[in-house]
Image (cartoon, rainbow, N blue to C red):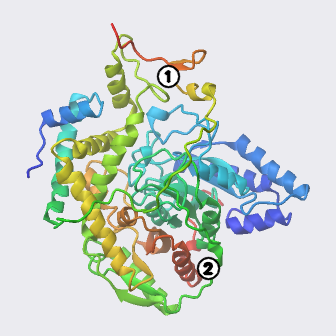
Amino acid sequence: MLQSTAGAIRDDVARGRISAVEICRACLDRTASVNSVLNAFNLVSAERALTQASEIDRRRAAGETLGPLAGVPVALKDNLCVRGVKTTASSRILEHFVPPYDATVVARLTAAGAVVVGKTNCDEFAMGSSNENSAFGPVRNPWAQDRTPGGSSGGSAAAVAARCVPVALGSDTGGSIRQPAAFCGVVGLKPTYGRVSRYGLLAFASSLDQIGPITHTVRDAALALNALAGTDPCDATSSHEPVPDFTAALTGAIKGIRVGVPRAFVTEGVDNGVRTAFDTAIETLRGSGARLVDIDLPHARYAIPVYYLVATAEASSNLARYDGVRYGYRSARDKDQSLQQMYSRTRDEGFGAEVKRRIMLGTYVLSAGYYDAYYLKAQQVRTLLRHDYQRAFETVDVVAMPTSPIPPFKLGEKTDDPLQMYLADVFTVSANLAGLPAISIPCGFSGGNLPIGLQLTGRMFDEATLLRVADAYERVTDWHARAPEVGAI
Amino acid sequence: MSSSLTIADVERIAALAQLELTTEEKQLFTKQLADILDYARQLQAVETSGVPATAYVLGERVEREDAGRPSLAIDDVVSNAPDPAPAAGLFRVPRVIG
């Protein structure tokens, strides 16, 4: 049952082959048995989940219409607000925060019949590539417990990989859905910027943040996107672009599809195992009828500096709201402290090192005398990078790259050198800077058991083609079906 | 353009960012931020004259009627505050006038 896809669970529940409560209990049991090892969940809302599940069973018994995700257990990254359920962003500053409202994605999943089983661990405020910046300890990779699951949505990816849930939501600002999906051997989709409402997502970098699903299969990602996508009056950046049925795109037919390969970009600094798996994966796509086309993305090599200037600038502004006044932690160091001291002590005590580092960097690049040289320059190079992709998409339908240049690395390996950690995002940040949809799908293993991801990037709002190519790859490979051994399944 | 930072620069930025950093944090960030800014200097080599800045990737113009809508209940809103004054519907802060 725990190996089931979301689609199969929904069908089984709808046909009465299994109850939503049974499914929910199985997921809760599995979560309880592996979480002490993985630390993937910050919170498990068992009682609430079982209540939601029995409501689905009641509806079915009453002959009421069931939603497209009826009875499907889902986990939510802990930066997504759920009314009445603690939402911390894995930060001390929000350790006891209980949102008074649901994020739009939570409302939509719930309306589709999904059952929320808990909140997953992540890097603090989604800032990190290894999940080691969580105030509640790192998540362990289900495939190799001395290694990182990736970040920042590490808990969501680990929870899906360990078969706690078939679907988890993550957020992706520079690769935070795709890189952990790659590291944990599961599917991770970052939709087009504007495709999914961010209302109720604790903001990191508003011109880059997107919410998306982490699943076992491309079909489940399409099913989840069906429920998540669409305009929302509560998020002015959500697009009015029509939302197709994404599962309808999964025809398996990719004959003639042009897959762009930025050879020069994906060669340098890439682990041998990753390179071999990538080369094999694109040959597999060719074998399924796709045409491989060499492309050039001349500004992609600047994506890391552009990203870390733009994202930190936006973060320094977004995180100004955490000031100890309206919600969250307040420093109690001195009862006679001034308002100013209260602000700055609250923030120093409440934020972790990486968040402070990024606030500092972002404040610096926006400050007088440095704005033009850093922030404006980064925004201009961002434009050139977008043009690179626009040109590439004149001749190709999707772009293929490894998701990460390296396989999952050891916990503690990069924590002393922030810049080395940032460089691990080299292949993922471009999609956010250009606003494009991108997906990571399992495409092999390095050194026997370290998962590798293939990343495909599509045109704006063309998730359909992206999913079609990813699904076609999945049909002729079985990497996605492999499961790590974490306790007994 | 050199981006080598001094402790004084870090103190100035920390004040702007409302962060009361410890001495150890100031030293650590001085080194780490300098490394990151040095790395970012490679952007100076890119020719960008006349290139517009991208702040936002969608062109859609989004407007709505300037009409009132229901808001969250005051009790719900102040319930997360570290020092709420729910009866008054206010957040309490340290004294700001002497």
Total number of numbered discs in the rendering = 2
> Residue at label 2?
A250
Amino acid at the residue labelled 2: Leu
Identified by mark 1, the residue type is: Pro
Q: Answer few, some or many: residues within 10 Å of disc 1's Cα (few below 14, many 20 plus, some between 14 and 19).
A: some
Q: Up-down: is A419 above or below A17?
A: above
Q: Which residue is mark 1?
A: B82
Q: Nearer the viewer, residue A61 or A307?
A: A307
Residue A394 x/y as whole percent: 38, 83
Q: Residue at x 80, y 62 (%)?
A: A13
Separation of residues labelled 2 and 1 (CA atoms): 50 Å
Q: Which mark, residue A398?
A: none
**Element class at badge 1:** loop
Chain under disc 1:
B
Whether residues under marks 2 and 1 lie with C-beta atoms below 8 angstroms apart, the answer is: no
Callout 2 and callout 1 share a chain: no
Left or right? Give the position of A43 relative to A462.
right
Q: Position of residue A383 (x, y in %)?
A: 30, 65
In this rendering, would B59 be left or right of A250? left
Residue under the image location 23 percent in, 54 percent down? A376
Is residue A26 visible from the viewing direction of this image? no
Please determine whether, in this image, residue A119 is positioned above or below residue A256.
above
